Amino acid sequence: MITLTTYEWVPDFAAPLMRAFRVRWALEEAGLPCRVRTVKFGPEQRSPGHLARQPFGQAPAIEEDGLTLFESGAIALYIAEKSETLLPKAPAERARAIAWLFAALNSVEILIQELAGIDLFHAEEAWARERRPQVEDQVRDRLSLLQDVLGDKDYLESRFTVGDLMMSDVLRILQHTDLLEDFPALNAYKKRCGARPAFQRALKGQLEGFREVA
Ligand SMILES: N[C@@H](CCC(=O)N[C@@H](CS)C(=O)NCC(=O)O)C(=O)O
C-alpha cells in the first residue's frame, strides 16, 4: 500500500490547496487506499529521514514497495499508470494525457503560483505591486489560450485523464482571485472536475486529516 507523506498542519487557507491533495485525488480516482505519514513544518522538514523522502524537504512524497517518490507530478503519473481512469492505454491518448500533466505544471502552474505568491505572501511590498500587473496579464493570456483549446469539450481531451486532474487542481490555486470568472468555460471545467466523487472524497480526507491534529 502507498504511504503518503504530508504536513501535520498548515494554515487554513492552504489546507485545501496543498499539493498532497492532488495525490489524494489521484489515489481516489484509481481506487487505491493509502496510509498517511505526517511531517511538521520546521526542522523536521530538514531531518535526514524526511530529506531521504523529499530531497527539498517539501511535501508530498510517497513510498511503496521500496520505492520512494517525490514531486506531485511524478507521483500523479505513477498512480495514473495503475488506473485506466487516469491514463488511457492507447499510446497516442496516453501521450496527450501526459502532455497536459506537464503543461499544467510547467506552463500554467508556474505563472499562477507566481501570482499566488505575490498575493498571499508579498501583497504589500513595493516590488510585488510593481510586478503583479505583468504577472496577471501573463496568467490571463495563458488562461485564454487554455480556454480556446478546451473549446466546448468537457475535458482537455476526449475524456477525463490525469492531465485534467492536474490542470483543474492548478486552476484551484486562483481561488483567492475572481480571475476565472472572466473565463466561464474554464471555470465550468474546474467545477466539473471538482464535482467528481473522487475529488470530493479526497477533499474530505485532506481536510479531516488536518482537523484531527488541530
Ligand atoms: N514541485 C513540488 C512542490 C512541492 C511544494 O511546494 N510543497 C509545498 C506544500 S504544497 C511545501 O512543501 N512547502 C514548504 C517548503 O517548500 O518548504 C511538487 O509539486 O511536489
Image (cartoon, grey):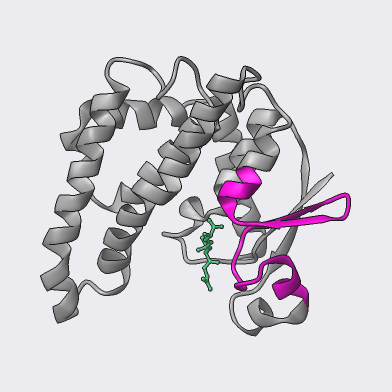
Asked whether residue 178 is in view, the answer is no
* Image vertical order of residue 155 relative to residue 174, above or below: above
Image coordinates of residue 76 in percent, x first then y, are 61, 42
* Image vertical order of residue 157 relative to residue 97, above or below: above
Quarter placement of the C terminus:
bottom right
Residue 73 horizontal side relative to residue 118, left or right: right
The foreground one among 124 and 111 is: 111
Image coordinates of residue 142 in percent, x first then y, are 24, 42
* Image vertical order of residue 105 relative to residue 25, above or below: below
Image coordinates of residue 21 in percent, x first then y, are 56, 48
Q: Given the current orientation, which residue lies at the most extreme right position? A: 65
Residue 180 horizontal side relative to residue 213, left or right: left
The foreground one among 197 and 67 is: 67
Image coordinates of residue 29 in percent, x first then y, are 64, 29
User: What residue appears at the point 45 percent right and 28 percent down from the top-left corner?
Assistant: 193
User: What residue appears at the point 51 percent right and 56 percent down from the top-left corner?
Assistant: 18
Q: Given the current orientation, which residue lies at the most extreme front position? A: 92
Q: Is residue 127 magenta?
A: no
Where are the magenta residues, as a range?
49-76
